[in-house]
Image (cartoon, coloured by chain):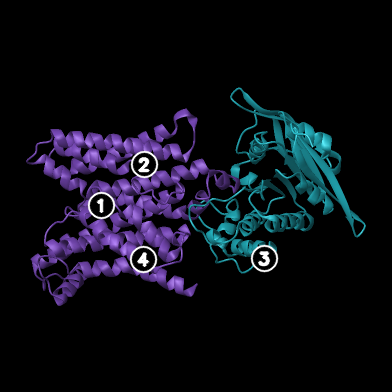
Chain colours: A purple, B cyan
Amino acid sequence: MKNKKIVRIIIYLLPIILVFISLFIGRYQISINSVLNILKAGITGNIDSVSDIEYSLIWDVRMPRTILAILVGGSLGISGAALQGLFRNPLVDSGILGVSSGAGFGAALAIIMFSGIFPIYLFSFAFSLVAVILSIRIGRINNSNSAILLVLGGVIISSIFSSLISFLKFIADPYNELPSIIFWLMGSLANASYREILISAIPMLLGISGLLAVRWKVNVLSMGEREAQTLGINIKVYRWIVIIFSTLATAGAVAVCGIISWIGLVIPHIGRMIVGNDNRYLMPVSIALGGFMLLIIDDFGRILTGGELPLNILTALIGGPFYIYLLKKTKEGAWR
Amino acid sequence: MILLENVGFSYGKNEIFNNINLNIKKEEILCVIGPNGSGKSTLLDCILGLKNANNGDIYIDGKSIKKYKINELAKHIAYIPQKQTSSFPFKIIDMVVMGRAAYVNSFSGPNEEDLKIARNALNYVGLSGFENRFFTEISGGEAQLVMIARAITQDTKLILMDEPTSHLDFHNELMVLEVISKLVKSKKISVIMATHFPNHAYFFQNEGINTKVGILYEKRINYLGKPDEILIEENIKKAFKIKSKVLNHYEDNKKYNYIVPLLTEKRKL
């Protein structure tokens, strides 16, 4: 028991340590001493002794980027864990109800219709909600209340929005709009600033806290609808709670960073291998691991290219081998 | 304890059963037997509040189950499924403590007290030391005992079971039946059990428990009473269209009854 507690504490510390390390990473070299001085200056407010460029690079570029990475990765990780529990299916990811493809369509539409970044956030957030609402409408056909129909609704809506994205790509101006759409669909933290954090942190933090509040109930929901209800859980209420909060968290994340695959699917699995299936621990751990993983991926992207490498290229390339390593290494909580 | 008055259920125009009248008292077991598709599980679903009876009403402690909230009903009736098919390998203790779901606040989890209740329940069914094992790596019989422990943790006066031994071998079947018997005797609870095995009813009667058996077929509970009055060759013939034989033997001056199926009606001996 004690060992497990230590393991969890280490996992919670990982993203915090990595945030610190990430401040040193980037094309512009800043010495360790300068970084420490700049951090101190930022906290004390005494900024006379440090270089303006370096100060702004640490506090206005790297810091918001790392914070956003943690928030986005954490949101995707916990949403994935919650939805896998709700739908009793380990192959479900945070985009199962159409959040990601709805967001992709909204962003593509905004890129074609408007210039500037803000409409993209707005449209992608709005359309991810639209996609989920449509999935739920399909899931309610015939007044049925089954989770399977809901998943089916998500799959249908996702593919409709994917087709619409293809259509928008087809009609987009191939010199400006098309590359923007493709780049957005591959996910990126390049636009991160405090403004992005302010916009997206509200839905993400709201979603995360809502999911954390009901995390033990997700255990009970994963027993199946019949059993959950006979155990005394109002499955309709809790199902909506899980769907609403995971949608908020995911929609907030994809709105500012584009579609990021893999984190919402695999992070909960990695979490299960380390802390087991109890969502009381799995869900917080999925936040920490999701944030950690996305930040590592972003760091790698920056180290490898010195520029901007879309996140989706590296998510599976780095996460995949790590997942295989864990699969071989761990026994507890793994699939049998 | 629980009273069913003229309960009927239909899927659209397809009537499953009607005019079901039952009254189960404290420390009593009701075994519902009947052919496949006769509606045993549907009847359990109506009592559990998972399906709404179209006709009649079901009362628990004198109050209609429609007036109970979901978590209130769960404090009165626990349910043991045929087989738990969780997609995730939970620890046994985590499974059992879910029995406290009706008592835990909306936005929290079980506390130390709940865990203690769950551990006691595991000890009660003879699974002490199983706490940290995984539900996916224990035997079918042990899994069913875990489900019983979860029902005990739920702290109800009535437990519903849907064919709790349907995929178990002889040893495990008896192990589960013995725990149920102990439960009724020592915790003074009532059990409603859908089963394919008439001998389960005989088993409980042989154990000295107040046992009733109801044979559900052709949309009614056509026979209801004590096992040795109801589980006789003519009734089994009408319900299941088979020939059967009631046997008994004496051990320590105590009479033990059984029934064995022999042949379907169409065949001749």
Tell me if residue B15 comes above or below residue A135 in the rendering.
Answer: above
Tell me which numbered mark, 2 or 1, is placed earlier along the sequence.
2
Q: Could you classify mark 2 by the number of other residues whose Cα lies within 10 Å: few (under 14), some (14-19), or many (20 or more)?
A: many
Residue for badge 3? B123
Residue for badge 4? A326
Residue for badge 2? A97
Residue for badge 1? A198
Where is the C terminus of chain B found, in terms of image quarters?
top right
Q: Amino acid at mark 3?
A: Asn
Q: Label 3 to label 4, Cα distance in Å?
A: 35 Å
Helix, strand or loop at mark 4: helix
Res A248 label = none
Q: Using residue A168 as the reference point, say whether residue A336 is left or right of it.
A: right
Q: Are marks 3 and 2 on the same chain?
A: no
Q: Label 1 to label 3, Cα distance in Å?
A: 52 Å
Tell me which numbered mark, 4 or 1, is placed earlier along the sequence.
1
- The subunit carrying tag 2 is A
Q: Are marks 4 and 1 on the same chain?
A: yes
Q: Are marks 2 and 1 on the same chain?
A: yes
Q: Label 4 to label 1, Cα distance in Å?
A: 35 Å
Q: Could you classify mark 3 by the number of other residues whose Cα lies within 10 Å: few (under 14), some (14-19), or many (20 or more)?
A: some
Q: Toward the viewer: A104 or A234?
A: A104
Helix, strand or loop at mark 2: loop
Q: Could you classify mark 1 by the number of other residues whose Cα lies within 10 Å: few (under 14), some (14-19), or many (20 or more)?
A: few
Helix, strand or loop at mark 3: helix
Q: Amino acid at mark 1?
A: Leu
Helix, strand or loop at mark 1: helix
Instruction: Give the number of the mark in front: 2 or 4.
Output: 4
- The subunit carrying tag 3 is B
- The subunit carrying tag 1 is A
